[in-house]
Image (cartoon, rainbow, N blue to C red):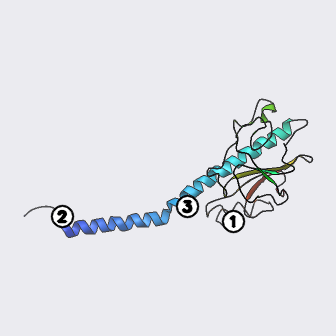
C-alpha cells in the first residue's frame, strides 16, 4: 500500500493554517502595532525634549526660551495648532540644537554641552501628526505637544495619555512646566 497524504488531507491542513493565520492577524492587528510603536517613539521624543528644556532652565542664570511667545512652532505644516492661546504658527523643521531648531533654544550653552544631540521629528510628521513647541518667555513657561496615533494612547484609549496629561487640550499629549498654553 502506498504511503503519503491524500489531496483531502492536504487541503484540510492548508485550510487550518489559513484560518490560524487570519486569526493571528486579527488578534495582533499589525497596523495598530505599528501605530503603537510610533506613539512610543513620540512619548520618548517628547520626554527627551521636555527634559532638555528643564535642564536648560535649571542651568542658565538668564534662560531664553526663544521667540515662541508670539506664535507656536510646529514641525509640519498644519491648518490647526495644539496651542489654544497661541493662534499664530510657524513651520520649523530643522533639528539643530543651537537655537535654530523647531525648539529655538540654544541648548549648546548648557553646562557640559547640549543635553540632546538633535531635536527629534515626529515619525510621520505630516499635517496631522507633528510636534509643537509653545512658550511664554517672560514667565519662563513652556509646552511641547504631540498627537497620538494608536487607539491605545489616544484620547479614550487603554493607556490614554492625551486627556490625562493635565493639559488644556484633550486631543494632544502635552508636557512642560505649563501645559495650558
Residue on which disc 1 sits? 155
Residue on which disc 2 sits? 5
Q: Nearer the viewer, residue 106 or 110?
A: 106
Q: How many marks?
A: 3
User: How many angstroms separate mark 2 from mark 1 (CA)?
Assistant: 53 Å
Which of discs 2 and 1 lies nearer the camera? The answer is: 1
The reply to whether dot 1 and dot 3 touch (C-beta < 8 Å) is no
The reply to whether dot 2 and dot 1 touch (C-beta < 8 Å) is no
Earlier-in-chain disc, 3 versus 2: 2
* Residue 26 vertical placement versus 81 (above, below): below
Which of discs 3 and 2 lies nearer the camera? The answer is: 3
Whole-percent x, y for residue 15 in the image: 31, 68
Earlier-in-chain disc, 1 versus 3: 3
Residue on which disc 3 sits? 32
Whole-percent x, y for residue 83 in the image: 80, 57
Give the residue displayed 21% in from the left and 70% down from the top.
Answer: 8
SS for callout 1: loop
**Marking on residue 180:** none
* Residue 116 vertical placement versus 13 (above, below): above
Furthest residue toward left: 1
Give the residue displayed 64% in from the left and 54% down from the top.
Answer: 126
Whole-percent x, y for residue 2 in the image: 9, 62
* Residue 44 vertical placement versus 60 (above, below): below
Q: Determine the image quadrant of residue 181.
A: bottom right
Amino acid at each position: 500500500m502506498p504511503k503519503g497524504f491524500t489531496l483531502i488531507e492536504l487541503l484540510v491542513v492548508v485550510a487550518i493554517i489559513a484560518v490560524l493565520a487570519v486569526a493571528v492577524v486579527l488578534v495582533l492587528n499589525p497596523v495598530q502595532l505599528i501605530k503603537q510603536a510610533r506613539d512610543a517613539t513620540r512619548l520618548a521624543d517628547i520626554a527627551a525634549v521636555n527634559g532638555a528644556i528643564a535642564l536648560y532652565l535649571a542651568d542658565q542664570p538668564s534662560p531664553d526660551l526663544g521667540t515662541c511667545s508670539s506664535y507656536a512652532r510646529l514641525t509640519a505644516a498644519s491648518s490647526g495648532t495644539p496651542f489654544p492661546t497661541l493662534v499664530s504658527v510657524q513651520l520649523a523643521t530643522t533639528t539643530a540644537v543651537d537655537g535654530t531648531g523647531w525648539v529655538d533654544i540654544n541648548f549648546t550653552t548648557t553646562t557640559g554641552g547640549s543635553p540632546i544631540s538633535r531635536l527629534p521629528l515626529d515619525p510621520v510628521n505630516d499635517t496631522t501628526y507633528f510636534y509643537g513647541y509653545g512658550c511664554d518667555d517672560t514667565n519662563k513657561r513652556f509646552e511641547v505637544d504631540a498627537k497620538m496615533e494608536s487607539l491605545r494612547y489616544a484620547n479614550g484609549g487603554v493607556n490614554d495619555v492625551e486627556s490625562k496629561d493635565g493639559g488644556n487640550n484633550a486631543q494632544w499629549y502635552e508636557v512642560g512646566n505649563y501645559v495650558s498654553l
